[in-house]
């Protein structure tokens, strides 16, 4: 969907703590609305090992078989997620029929730039950056690193999370989702006001 020069692929990007109530709410979203959403699931806990049958069932029940969902594992790891683990869990979900896209937190990715090639073969990557803790130079380095490691054809979505900018009017807080084209310049894909 094109509006002027702004690409609006996803109109809404909810950040879900992936608890039972949020999973149920996502299941109830009508298909026409779900198609315009790119939810980010902040996974709170993982099972032992690479296989995640419980998570896979939850994602499939939430209409995950037909619509992409971002997997953010930072809460489950209580900090930086090894890029290899992130890629492995996303690949397992994809093998089970869930179009899961790995969410790479830019602040953590800087330390793991050498492992970015582990993301090669993913259908897309979401780079999540926080306005208060991610310098623009770091964000650009992560995007360039993913491009170099995975190729120019891989879709990269950049989620600029502006929620924790401090004492800002709640109506002014937003998250912005950008999609990078084959070039290095991101295109605006959607804006979501936070609650």
Image (cartoon, rainbow, N blue to C red):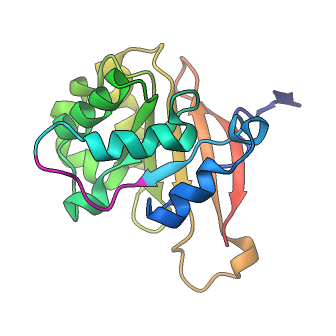
Residue furthest right in the image: 4
Residue 71 screen position, x and y as percent: 39, 44
Task: Indicate yes or no whether the magenta region holds residue 161.
Answer: no
Q: Compared with residue 36, is residue 54 higher up or lower down, i.e. above or below? A: below
Magenta stretch, residue numbers: 42-48
Q: Is residue 162 found left or right of 192 in the rendered image? A: left
State the residue at coordinates (23%, 23%).
117
* Residue closest to the eye, 90 or 176: 90
Q: Looking at the picture, does residue 166 appear above or below residue 140? A: below
Q: Is residue 111 above or below residue 122?
A: below
Query: Does residue 136 show up?
Result: no
Identify the residue at horizontal 76%, vertical 42% (top origin).
33
- Residue 46 in picture, x, y percent from top left: 23, 53
Outermost left residue: 49
Q: Position of residue 94 (x, y in %)?
A: 37, 25
Type of secondary structure dominating the magenta stretch: loop
Query: In this image, 172 relative to 92: left or right?
Result: right
- For the image, the number of numbered tags is 0
């Amino acid at each position: 969907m094109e509006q002027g020069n702004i690409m609006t692929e996803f109109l809404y990007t909810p950040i879900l703590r992936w608890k039972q109530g949020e999973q149920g709410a996502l299941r109830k979203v009508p298909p026409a609305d779900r198609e315009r959403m790119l939810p980010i699931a902040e996974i709170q806990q993982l099972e032992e090992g690479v296989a995640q049958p419980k998570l896979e069932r939850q994602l499939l029940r939430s209409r995950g078989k037909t619509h992409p969902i971002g997997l953010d594992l930072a809460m489950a790891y209580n900090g930086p997620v090894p890029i290899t683990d992130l890629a492995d869990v996303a690949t397992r979900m994809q093998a089970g029929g869930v179009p899961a896209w790995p969410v790479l937190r830019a602040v953590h990715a800087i330390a793991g730039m050498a492992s970015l090639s582990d993301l090669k073969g993913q259908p897309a990557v979401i780079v999540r950056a926080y306005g208060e803790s991610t310098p623009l130079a770091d964000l650009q380095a992560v995007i360039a690193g993913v491009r170099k490691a995975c190729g120019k054809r891989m879709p990269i979505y950049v989620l600029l999370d502006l929620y924790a900018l401090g004492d800002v009017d709640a109506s002014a807080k937003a998250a912005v989702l950008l999609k990078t084209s084959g070039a290095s310049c991101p295109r605006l894909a959607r804006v979501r006001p936070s609650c």
